[in-house]
Amino acid sequence: HMAWWEAGLRLLLATVVGCIIGIERERKNRPAGMRTHVLVCVGAATIAMLECYMIADTISLNLNNDHSGIAVSMGRISAQVVSGIGFLGAGTIFISQKKIAGLTTAASLWNAACLGLAAGMGYYGLAIAGCTIVMITLVALQKVVRVNSVKNVEVKFIHRVDTLAFINSYFEEAGIRVLDIDFHVENKGKYNLYTNVYTLDMQGKTTYKDIVNHLSEYANIQGIRTRNT
Protein backbone atom coordinates (compact mmCIF):
# COMPACT_ATOMS: atom_id res chain seq x y z
CA HIS A 1 0.00 0.00 0.00
CA MET A 2 1.17 3.51 -0.76
CA ALA A 3 1.86 5.78 2.23
CA TRP A 4 -0.84 8.29 3.26
CA TRP A 5 1.42 11.22 2.34
CA GLU A 6 1.91 9.86 -1.17
CA ALA A 7 -1.85 9.46 -1.65
CA GLY A 8 -2.29 13.06 -0.43
CA LEU A 9 0.47 14.27 -2.77
CA ARG A 10 -1.21 12.60 -5.77
CA LEU A 11 -4.56 14.22 -4.96
CA LEU A 12 -2.84 17.58 -4.44
CA LEU A 13 -1.04 17.29 -7.79
CA ALA A 14 -4.37 16.48 -9.51
CA THR A 15 -5.86 19.61 -7.88
CA VAL A 16 -2.97 21.79 -9.08
CA VAL A 17 -3.08 20.38 -12.64
CA GLY A 18 -6.86 20.91 -12.88
CA CYS A 19 -6.48 24.40 -11.43
CA ILE A 20 -3.81 25.45 -13.97
CA ILE A 21 -5.80 24.22 -17.00
CA GLY A 22 -9.07 25.62 -15.60
CA ILE A 23 -7.62 29.09 -14.98
CA GLU A 24 -6.50 29.29 -18.62
CA ARG A 25 -10.02 28.37 -19.80
CA GLU A 26 -11.69 30.76 -17.35
CA ARG A 27 -9.50 33.66 -18.48
CA LYS A 28 -10.90 33.14 -21.97
CA ASN A 29 -14.45 33.06 -20.57
CA ARG A 30 -15.09 29.44 -21.59
CA PRO A 31 -17.94 27.47 -19.95
CA ALA A 32 -15.83 24.87 -18.11
CA GLY A 33 -13.75 26.89 -15.66
CA MET A 34 -11.32 26.31 -12.84
CA ARG A 35 -13.59 24.42 -10.42
CA THR A 36 -14.95 22.08 -13.12
CA HIS A 37 -11.44 21.12 -14.23
CA VAL A 38 -10.26 20.55 -10.65
CA LEU A 39 -13.26 18.33 -9.86
CA VAL A 40 -12.81 16.17 -12.95
CA CYS A 41 -9.05 15.87 -12.39
CA VAL A 42 -9.48 14.89 -8.71
CA GLY A 43 -12.21 12.38 -9.62
CA ALA A 44 -9.95 10.74 -12.19
CA ALA A 45 -7.07 10.62 -9.67
CA THR A 46 -9.39 9.01 -7.10
CA ILE A 47 -10.30 6.24 -9.56
CA ALA A 48 -6.66 5.70 -10.55
CA MET A 49 -5.62 5.39 -6.90
CA LEU A 50 -8.56 3.10 -6.21
CA GLU A 51 -7.27 0.76 -8.92
CA CYS A 52 -3.73 0.94 -7.40
CA TYR A 53 -5.10 0.01 -3.97
CA MET A 54 -7.12 -2.88 -5.42
CA ILE A 55 -4.07 -4.26 -7.26
CA ALA A 56 -1.99 -4.01 -4.05
CA ASP A 57 -4.74 -5.84 -2.13
CA THR A 58 -4.86 -8.64 -4.73
CA ILE A 59 -1.07 -9.04 -4.58
CA SER A 60 -1.12 -9.18 -0.76
CA LEU A 61 -3.94 -11.76 -0.90
CA ASN A 62 -1.76 -13.96 -3.12
CA LEU A 63 1.27 -13.55 -0.87
CA ASN A 64 -0.73 -14.36 2.26
CA ASN A 65 -2.24 -17.44 0.64
CA ASP A 66 1.09 -18.96 -0.33
CA HIS A 67 1.01 -17.79 -3.99
CA SER A 68 -2.27 -19.58 -4.63
CA GLY A 69 -2.94 -17.55 -7.81
CA ILE A 70 -6.04 -15.65 -6.73
CA ALA A 71 -7.13 -13.51 -9.70
CA VAL A 72 -9.52 -10.61 -9.35
CA SER A 73 -11.10 -8.90 -12.34
CA MET A 74 -10.09 -5.28 -11.79
CA GLY A 75 -12.26 -2.29 -12.34
CA ARG A 76 -15.12 -3.74 -14.42
CA ILE A 77 -17.90 -2.41 -12.20
CA SER A 78 -15.99 0.78 -11.39
CA ALA A 79 -15.71 1.52 -15.12
CA GLN A 80 -19.48 1.21 -15.52
CA VAL A 81 -20.08 3.67 -12.68
CA VAL A 82 -17.49 6.16 -13.97
CA SER A 83 -18.95 6.26 -17.48
CA GLY A 84 -22.59 5.70 -16.49
CA ILE A 85 -22.79 8.65 -14.11
CA GLY A 86 -22.17 10.88 -17.16
CA PHE A 87 -25.87 10.58 -18.01
CA LEU A 88 -26.82 12.09 -14.66
CA GLY A 89 -24.27 14.85 -15.16
CA ALA A 90 -25.66 15.67 -18.59
CA GLY A 91 -29.06 16.21 -16.98
CA THR A 92 -27.69 19.02 -14.81
CA ILE A 93 -26.18 20.98 -17.73
CA PHE A 94 -28.41 23.46 -19.53
CA ILE A 95 -27.87 26.09 -22.23
CA SER A 96 -29.65 29.44 -22.23
CA GLN A 97 -28.86 32.42 -24.47
CA LYS A 98 -25.62 30.78 -25.65
CA LYS A 99 -24.47 30.47 -22.03
CA ILE A 100 -23.75 27.03 -20.60
CA ALA A 101 -24.50 26.44 -16.91
CA GLY A 102 -24.36 23.43 -14.62
CA LEU A 103 -20.95 22.07 -15.62
CA THR A 104 -19.55 22.36 -12.10
CA THR A 105 -22.57 20.51 -10.69
CA ALA A 106 -22.12 17.77 -13.31
CA ALA A 107 -18.43 17.47 -12.34
CA SER A 108 -19.21 17.35 -8.61
CA LEU A 109 -21.88 14.68 -9.25
CA TRP A 110 -19.37 12.57 -11.15
CA ASN A 111 -16.88 13.12 -8.33
CA ALA A 112 -19.44 11.99 -5.78
CA ALA A 113 -19.74 8.71 -7.71
CA CYS A 114 -15.94 8.27 -7.67
CA LEU A 115 -15.81 8.96 -3.92
CA GLY A 116 -18.74 6.59 -3.40
CA LEU A 117 -16.73 3.82 -5.08
CA ALA A 118 -13.79 4.54 -2.76
CA ALA A 119 -16.01 4.47 0.33
CA GLY A 120 -17.87 1.36 -0.81
CA MET A 121 -14.63 -0.52 -1.39
CA GLY A 122 -13.48 0.35 2.12
CA TYR A 123 -10.76 2.90 1.30
CA TYR A 124 -11.92 5.37 3.92
CA GLY A 125 -8.88 7.66 3.92
CA LEU A 126 -9.09 8.14 0.16
CA ALA A 127 -12.83 8.89 0.32
CA ILE A 128 -12.37 11.47 3.12
CA ALA A 129 -9.37 13.16 1.45
CA GLY A 130 -11.20 13.33 -1.91
CA CYS A 131 -14.34 14.72 -0.26
CA THR A 132 -12.29 17.41 1.52
CA ILE A 133 -10.69 18.54 -1.77
CA VAL A 134 -14.09 18.61 -3.52
CA MET A 135 -15.57 20.79 -0.74
CA ILE A 136 -12.58 23.17 -0.76
CA THR A 137 -12.88 23.41 -4.56
CA LEU A 138 -16.62 24.17 -4.49
CA VAL A 139 -16.65 26.54 -1.52
CA ALA A 140 -13.31 28.30 -1.29
CA LEU A 141 -11.26 27.99 -4.48
CA GLN A 142 -12.82 30.86 -6.44
CA LYS A 143 -12.40 33.20 -3.45
CA VAL A 144 -8.72 32.29 -3.03
CA VAL A 145 -7.71 32.20 -6.72
CA ARG A 146 -8.90 35.30 -8.56
CA VAL A 147 -9.05 34.96 -12.33
CA ASN A 148 -8.93 38.12 -14.43
CA SER A 149 -11.40 36.89 -16.99
CA VAL A 150 -12.19 38.46 -20.33
CA LYS A 151 -15.68 39.98 -20.50
CA ASN A 152 -17.81 41.58 -23.21
CA VAL A 153 -19.85 44.75 -22.54
CA GLU A 154 -22.19 46.36 -25.09
CA VAL A 155 -22.70 50.13 -24.72
CA LYS A 156 -25.26 52.17 -26.75
CA PHE A 157 -24.68 55.93 -26.72
CA ILE A 158 -25.12 59.31 -28.50
CA HIS A 159 -22.72 62.30 -28.80
CA ARG A 160 -19.75 60.18 -29.79
CA VAL A 161 -16.77 62.41 -28.90
CA ASP A 162 -17.85 63.36 -25.35
CA THR A 163 -19.11 59.90 -24.47
CA LEU A 164 -16.04 58.05 -25.74
CA ALA A 165 -13.81 60.37 -23.71
CA PHE A 166 -15.92 59.57 -20.60
CA ILE A 167 -15.87 55.78 -21.21
CA ASN A 168 -12.13 55.65 -21.97
CA SER A 169 -11.17 57.73 -18.93
CA TYR A 170 -13.33 55.49 -16.68
CA PHE A 171 -11.69 52.30 -18.00
CA GLU A 172 -8.26 53.85 -17.45
CA GLU A 173 -9.09 54.89 -13.85
CA ALA A 174 -10.53 51.45 -13.03
CA GLY A 175 -7.48 49.67 -14.50
CA ILE A 176 -9.58 47.83 -17.11
CA ARG A 177 -7.74 46.93 -20.32
CA VAL A 178 -9.70 47.16 -23.57
CA LEU A 179 -8.62 44.21 -25.74
CA ASP A 180 -10.96 44.84 -28.66
CA ILE A 181 -13.80 47.17 -29.75
CA ASP A 182 -16.54 46.23 -32.21
CA PHE A 183 -18.69 49.21 -33.27
CA HIS A 184 -21.93 49.87 -35.12
CA VAL A 185 -23.78 53.13 -36.03
CA GLU A 186 -27.51 53.65 -36.61
CA ASN A 187 -29.07 56.87 -37.89
CA LYS A 188 -32.05 57.85 -35.72
CA GLY A 189 -33.07 61.03 -37.61
CA LYS A 190 -31.93 63.79 -35.26
CA TYR A 191 -28.84 61.94 -34.05
CA ASN A 192 -26.66 58.89 -34.57
CA LEU A 193 -26.94 55.99 -32.11
CA TYR A 194 -23.57 54.29 -31.61
CA THR A 195 -23.13 50.73 -30.32
CA ASN A 196 -19.69 49.67 -29.07
CA VAL A 197 -18.99 46.13 -27.92
CA TYR A 198 -15.91 46.20 -25.66
CA THR A 199 -13.85 43.08 -24.95
CA LEU A 200 -12.44 43.83 -21.51
CA ASP A 201 -9.67 42.28 -19.45
CA MET A 202 -11.03 42.80 -15.92
CA GLN A 203 -8.13 43.68 -13.64
CA GLY A 204 -8.24 44.06 -9.86
CA LYS A 205 -11.52 44.29 -8.00
CA THR A 206 -13.75 45.97 -10.63
CA THR A 207 -16.85 43.88 -11.38
CA TYR A 208 -19.47 43.88 -14.12
CA LYS A 209 -21.86 45.56 -11.68
CA ASP A 210 -19.43 48.44 -11.04
CA ILE A 211 -19.07 49.07 -14.79
CA VAL A 212 -22.83 49.04 -15.42
CA ASN A 213 -23.54 51.31 -12.41
CA HIS A 214 -20.86 53.83 -13.32
CA LEU A 215 -21.59 54.06 -17.05
CA SER A 216 -25.38 54.16 -16.65
CA GLU A 217 -25.10 57.41 -14.64
CA TYR A 218 -23.89 59.26 -17.76
CA ALA A 219 -26.78 60.92 -19.63
CA ASN A 220 -25.50 60.22 -23.18
CA ILE A 221 -25.38 56.45 -22.59
CA GLN A 222 -28.68 54.93 -23.71
CA GLY A 223 -28.14 51.29 -22.75
CA ILE A 224 -25.59 48.81 -21.41
CA ARG A 225 -25.66 45.06 -21.41
CA THR A 226 -23.19 42.28 -20.75
CA ARG A 227 -22.63 39.65 -23.41
CA ASN A 228 -21.31 36.11 -23.41
CA THR A 229 -20.39 35.74 -27.05
Image (cartoon, rainbow, N blue to C red):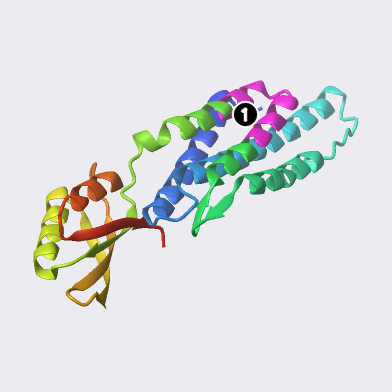
Residue depicted at 69% across the width and 30% down the height? 116
In the displayed structure, would residue 202 be above or below residue 48? below
Numbered circles on residues, count:
1
Using the rendered image of the protein, determine whether residue 151 is visible from the camera's viewpoint.
no
Residue 114 falls within the magenta-colored stretch: yes
Q: Quadrant of the C terminus?
A: bottom left
Residue 79: image quadrant is: top right
Three-letter code, disc 1 = Met
Locate residue 29 relative to residue 75 in the image: left or right.
left
Of 78 and 28, nearer the camera is: 28
Residue 121: image quadrant is: top right
- Image location (x, y in percent) of residue 144: 35, 34
Identify the residue under disc 1.
Answer: 2
- Image location (x, y in percent) of residue 223: 27, 58
Locate residue 54 relative to residue 131 in the image: left or right.
right
Q: Quadrant of the N terminus?
A: top right
Magenta-drawn segment: 112-130
In the displayed structure, would residue 204 be above or below residue 120? below
The secondary structure that dominates the magenta segment is helix
Judged from this view, the residue extending furthest toward the front is 190
Residue depicted at 45% across the width and 56% down the height? 30
Residue depicted at 37% across the width and 53% down the height? 27
- Image location (x, y in percent) of residue 153: 30, 58
Of 212 and 114, nearer the camera is: 212
- Image location (x, y in percent) of residue 99: 48, 55
Estimate how packed mark 1 is, as few (under 14), some (14 to 19) or many (20 or more) residues with alpha carbons within 10 Å: few
